[in-house]
Image (spheres, rainbow, N blue to C red):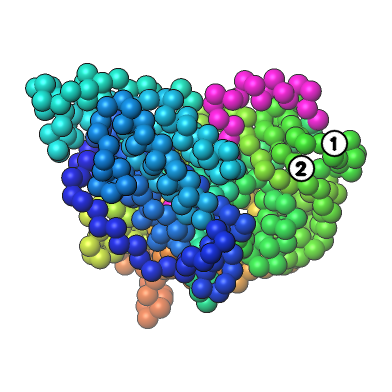
Amino acid sequence: MAEYGNDQKKMKTVKATNVTFQSGHVTRNKRGQVMGKRGGFRGCTVWFTGLSGAGKTTLSFALEEYLVGRGIPAYGLDGDNMRTGLNKNLGFSDDDREENIRRVAEVAKLFADSGVVSLCSFVSPFAKDRQVARELHQAVGLPFFEVFVDTPLEVCEQRDVKGLYKKARAGLIKGFTGIDGRYEKPENPTITVKTANSAVGDCVQQVVSVLQEHGIVPYCLVREPGIVSYATLDQVRELAVPENEVAAVLARTKDMPSVEISELDLQWLQVLSEGWATPLSGFMTEKEYLQCQHFGALYDDGVVNQSIPIVLPVSSADKERVAGCEELCLRYQGRPVGIIKHPEFYNHNKEERCARQFGTITLNHPYIKMIYESGDWLCGGPTLGLERIRWNDGLDQYRLTPVELRAKFREMGADAVFAFQLRNPVHNGHALLMQNTRERLISEGHKKPVLLLHPLGGWTKDDDVPLDTRMKQHHAVLEEGILDPETTVLAIFPSPMMYAGPTEVQWHAKARMSAGANFYIVGRDPAGMPNPDTGKDLYDPTHGRRVLAMAPGLAQLEIVPFQVAAYDKTVNKMALFDPSRKDDFLFISGTKMRSLARSGEDPPEGFMGKKAWQVLCSYYQSLKQ
């Protein structure tokens, strides 16, 4: 790819950050807080190895920019800055190459010991030399990560901006790695990165993910002096056992203490394992639960919006049976589906949870009822899924993960992604909001805005239209051209519905950020429902939009406010409501729509696409039968 193999010399200008260096191998920020190996994060060495032209230095410098831009000290070492100085007396014989790598490793170790992330990009063709570098770090307890930049030789030659491969092919350079010099591929690298068909940013995020998993880099942005920063969610945290370890972990689960989880719990496990709740590392611990319940956010060197608790209730009997275990197996219908490491148990105060989350404790609220019927304890800790969760309902192909959605948007060339959350059928008023949003983004200079039509696919209350019917109806809307199928991605959001109003709508918005959305359309009374005791709205219909505009940790997501659409009788179609001529508009409530569908009557022409309306009619008439 063109972005790899740039021959321009990199200017080593590191932007001023909140990090300075003091004696004693400790890094401190300007407030005097320790950030080095005894606090904040540890220094380490990331060692990029691969053929010349593989993209090692490009990735190293891009990673350096990523880290330094977030207040994390990092420095890139490569052949240009090592062989023109410390190693300028060395050639390219096997002995000199060995000594070159040894010296680089010693320098990298010193950087890492001072709290810096040392980034080394060297061909380093021999496994024994790389092992020496690893052992130098291990001997003093410093983390060492080997990144194999696995790029085919033909791609490296295409990127040959220095003409080295051409000279080697002509016999002008002897012993050139990959031509007449051997390269020993790493047998067990920390991570393998393939740059041939991947963007630099994507490869950087793969390495960042490793650093986050090992506690080197926090999941939130680092705080600048006096400023609380917000997480950008530019890195999705999937929680799944690596594919090559699944068999071994499954074998361990046979003797592992276990608890049986419900279908609702399995849906939340899917949310966690696919990365929708980044940066959570699993079902919430008590500390995370308290932050969520009292502040609506997680705090870890920054602020990440997390308005609703993602917790695992367990019974008192299960808690007593498995307490003290190192690993806990989660089983669904007897099948192992996940594990929790070092599980922590804490009291499930149901009344307080419901009062804070829903603003009511009525047992007639369907999700509150499920909370009160669940276990008296909550279990949290680092959680990993053992398999990709499938529901085998003919809709699994639409259950795209955040990583898959981001890849889809890149493939489409999207320069803006606007998401629409819904749990109801799409009428032409909804479509009008989405059409207007796309036109607005184009007028602002975006070339390819893409709509994420993202119906909720987890648990919903009994009187909601079921997922399979909604998906058929959404397909009909696309088939009729009411929404443009070329610029729309229809996918399923796996979260359960809680009907928690403005509290929940923050979760809906934040989760779409994980999928790469940067614009979010919010409707009237999002995530609301009538009070089951009085029939009145539980939440003010306008508060969802207003709360989203103020919510902590959502600053990077632009909220597209709901515009009221109604049926304009003068033009026989849905249009934006004009209060100055209110008598020209007809508001068709959900109750009225359901009544027409049950009786097989048609709504006013232009209210909903004909095929889409027929899907809805067929469903409601089937209920009568």
The local secondary structure at tag 1 comes to helix
Q: Earlier in the sequence, mark 1 or mark 2?
A: 1
Dividing the image into 4 quarters, which one contains the C terminus? top right
Q: Is residue 442 visible?
A: yes
| Residue 193 sits in quarter | top left
| Image coordinates for residue 145, horizontal then vertical, percent | 48, 38
Q: Is residue 490 visible?
A: no
Amino acid, disc 1: Val
Q: Residue at left 72%, top 52%?
A: 285
Dividing the image into 4 quarters, which one contains the N terminus? top left
Left or right, 562 with respect to 244, comes to left
Residue 19: mark:
none
Report if residue 230 lies within the magenta region. yes
Q: Which residues are magenta?
A: 229-257
Of 190 and 80, the residue lying toward us: 80
| Residue 177 sits in quarter | top left
Amino acid, disc 2: Pro
The local secondary structure at tag 2 comes to loop
**Cα–Cα gap, marks 1 and 2:** 9 Å
**Cβ–Cβ below 8 Å for labels 1 and 2?**
yes
Secondary structure that dominates the magenta span: loop
For label 2, the residue is 343
| Image coordinates for residue 481, horizontal then vertical, percent | 30, 45
**How packed is label 1: few (under 14 Cα within 10 Å), some, or many (20 or more)?**
some
